Image: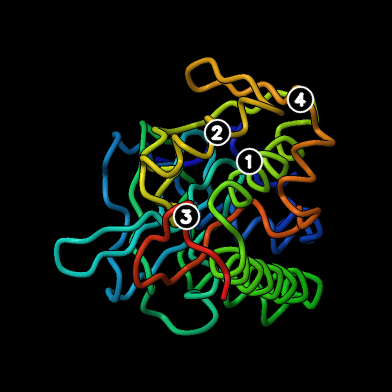
Amino acid sequence: MSLERKQKDFLKQHPMFNTLGAASFGTLIEAAELRTEAARTVLFWEGERSAVCYVLLEGLVELFAKAGSRKVSVDLLGPPAMFPLSNVFGQPNPVVSARTIRTSDLIVIPSRVLRGLALGDSAFSTRVAAEISATCDQVMKQFSSHNLMYGVERVASYLLAENRRQGDIGVVRLATRKSMLASSLGLAPESLSRALAMLRKCAIEVNGNEIRLIDLEQLAKVAGQKQGLGGMPVLKRSKARSDQSAPE
């Protein structure tokens, strides 16, 4: 489905595309198409070459990895996420799979078009490099988080990061099931429940999928002041660590 005015405006304001010149943006719009996918639709599988890149307009997407019967949630993406960008410009075979969590609207762009834009537009190529670099940096921070922080510290750090992303209003609304959130933080579901119960005693109130942060200072203390380690989960884990696991 071709893009309507609303979707074109969305792309024009997207941080990856808002420096494109008229000709380059026209090339982008001509090649892009709108796709609506039902919940639990797999967009691509780990290891299978992908010829397109997605920009999430509405909805929620999970990046996940599987090994035999085991599955781990790697990341949860909301608008205006663009993925898998590293596979457009680097290794073409994704290291994770992606699926929609709920009905989602996505703008689909051929990878060859993005590569062409990067070759002809230095500002866009710089944006691409900066975005991939930031993602790699965040992955390393998350690796540190998962291996150096207790479960309750990870949850506290995640809540602080989510609060910033959701407007610093002191309320975090979880976009998905707590079991999926636990997986993305490298925790078993029961470990997440124990961590939330511990935080309820000093810093938060929980009402379903809404978490009210009633003491940000105390929450930051629990997180060890390492708020930069919260937010995105790590890409690779051999097993989930419980909230009782400790750094060596």
Where disc 1 sits, the SS reads: helix
User: Mark 4 or 2, which is nearer the eye?
Assistant: 4
Viewer-proximal residue among 42 and 234: 234
Mark 4 and mark 3 in contact (Cβ < 8 Å)? Answer: no
For label 2, the residue is 4
Quarter location, residue 226: bottom right
Which residue is more in the foreground, 211 or 5? 211
Which residue corresponds to mark 1?
Answer: 8
Residue 15 is situated, as x and y percent measured from the top left of the image, at: 75, 53
Residue at image position (40%, 70%) is: 237
Label 3: which residue?
A: 244
Whether pointer 1 and pointer 2 mark residues with C-beta atoms closer than 8 Å, the reply is yes
Eyeballing the image, is 66 above or below 87?
above
In the figure, 49 relative to 231: above or below? below
Q: Is residue 215 left or right of residue 50?
A: right
How many angstroms separate mark 4 from mark 2 (CA)? Answer: 36 Å
Left or right of 61? Residue 85 is right
The three-letter code of the residue at mark 3 reads Gln
Q: Position of residue 240 (x, y in %)?
A: 38, 60
Among the two numbered marks 4 and 1 on one chain, the one whose residue lies closer to the N terminus: 1
Mark 3: few, some, or many residues within 10 Å (few <14, many ≥20)? few
Residue linked to disc 4? 170
Given this view, does label 3 or label 4 mark the residue nearer the observer? 3
